[in-house]
Image: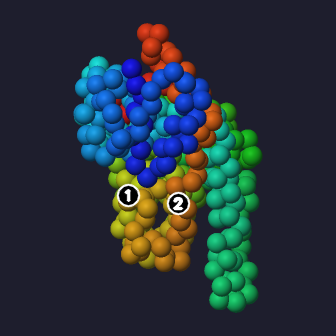
Amino acid sequence: MSIVIVFNNKDPKPWAEKLKSKLSDIPIQIYPEIHDPLIVKFALCWKPHQNILLQFPNLKVVQSVGASVEHIIKTQELRKTITLSRIVDNNLSHDMWEYLLTAILSISKNNFIYAHQQSIKLWKQHPYTNIQNTNISILGLGKIGSFVAEKLGLLGYKVKGWSSSVKNINNVISYSGIQQLDKCLHNTDILINILPLTDTTQNILNITNLKKINAGGYLINVGRGEHLVENDLLDLLEEKYLSGAILDVFRSEPLPDNHPFWNHPKIQITPHVASLTNIESASLQIVENYNRFTSGKELMHQVSLKKGY
């Protein structure tokens, strides 16, 4: 039996070294240097190329090394006998919370505006908003989204959230289902997207939905690039309906050099760093799942192939 690491745009060597230190007796192969595909039963994946996993006919477990799995579901033909799992890590929730709080305060206190003004030596004051008068709506109330929503509510922000099912979160008004999306978007100053990518949520950040938040509002997208209709955002910024956007995820990563987002004065870009997987803590979950698999036990953090999360 062997473990295979299949990564795209991520260095597999640190992961291989960490796993070898914890599973010293288990052969670990790094794609594309595969010596024997027939003995591979457990795969670690990050954004694998189209249907790469089909070359492992005895594969039983596919483990994402991140919180998301759509990069696997959308590119691989997974047999019904394969179990798909993901990483669920408190570090991811805390890191996302810190990123979003930084972004929210930067918006409220006009930090991005002043950074631009400094570059052109412009001295001009702008009104700011405080916590109690800022309405935040969060799309996606999974483990990370719920954590962020509750923390923002405790600080005094007015927080609403939307997901596939109603959540009971302190100081947060929860909505669910497509029929309640408008209620969540209404009277929103800052819209945060942390949704998983599914057929239902793809392109959800479109001109119709974005126009339902307050004029002058902001968008923060830390979900997936495919949630956002890019030209719709550009149009809303051009007509000054939205004041700006902070984007951490994109349809094509790395973002192409000629993409209009790079030079847009109202768009702030970060290179998919809002919440990064910690190799040490993630490897503990991977080893635990491997041991559960070899013992015939249920794996942690399994994903429904039908739902996509």
Residue 191 visible in the shown view: no
Residue 66 visible in the shown view: yes
Q: In this rendering, would 40 be left or right of 142? A: left
User: In the displayed structure, would residue 156 be above or below residue 231?
Assistant: above
Q: Give residue 306's quadrant in the image.
A: top left
Mark 2 element type: loop
Q: Which residue is rendered at x = 68% and y = 50% of the image?
A: 98
Mark 1 element type: loop
Name the residue tied to disc 2. 271
Circle 2 or circle 1, nearest the eye: 2
What's the distance in space between the residues labelled 2 and 1, CA to CA? 12 Å
Q: In this rendering, would 7 be left or right of 213? A: left
| Residue kind at label 1, given as amino acid type | Arg
Can you give x and y, in whole percent of width and height, for residue 179 in the image? 38, 40
Q: Which residue is rendered at x = 51% and y = 43% of the image?
A: 13
Can you give x and y, in whole percent of width and height, for residue 209 in the image? 40, 55
Q: Which residue is rendered at x = 65% and y = 89% of the image?
A: 120
